[in-house]
Amino acid sequence: MNDMHDNNLIRFINLTKKKDGIFANFKVKGIKGGVAFTASISVDIAAADVHPGDPLEKIVESCAGRAVREFKRSEIQFEGIAVAL
């Protein structure tokens, strides 16, 4: 159950247009190592090498792939707390 696709749910929410660009928004819910978590991920579609004129399915697929890769590589820290492992 180490694979993100097996034990976590990554759900597309919507596309939003902001001053900085157009973003695909995702929600992540899962359990890993006995810890339940939720997260929000926003992916700039320009960073995912897609264009606003592309089909929605292509935009979501490219952004979701990038979101999963970056989420797996992220190192999350608690603000203001030093934890020695």
Image: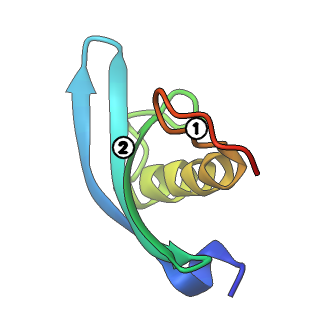
Q: Is residue 83 above or below residue 49?
A: below
Q: Is residue 82 above or below residue 41?
A: above
Is 23 left, or right, of 75 in this rendering? left
Foreground pick, 16 / 31 = 31
Q: Which mark is residue 24?
A: 2
Residue 18 visible: yes
Pointer 2 and pointer 1: residues touching (CB < 8 Å)?
Answer: yes
Quadrant location of the N terminus in the rendered image: bottom right
Q: Earlier in the sequence, mark 2 or mark 1?
A: 2
Instruction: Determine the residue positioned at 66% across, 42% down.
Output: 75
Q: Secondary structure at mark 1?
A: loop
Foreground pick, 6 / 12 = 6
Q: Which residue is mark 1?
A: 48
- Point out residue 10 in the picture as x, y percentages from the top left corner: 43, 68
User: Label 2, label 1: how many angstroms apart (C-alpha)?
Assistant: 10 Å
- Residue type, label 2: Ala
- Point out residue 56 in the picture as x, y percentages from the top left corner: 36, 54
Q: Secondary structure at mark 2?
A: strand
Instruction: Determine the residue positioned at 61% across, 34% down.
Output: 82
Residue 9 visible: no
Instruction: Determine the residue positioned at 60% across, 57% down.
Output: 68
Extreme residue toward the right, this view: 85
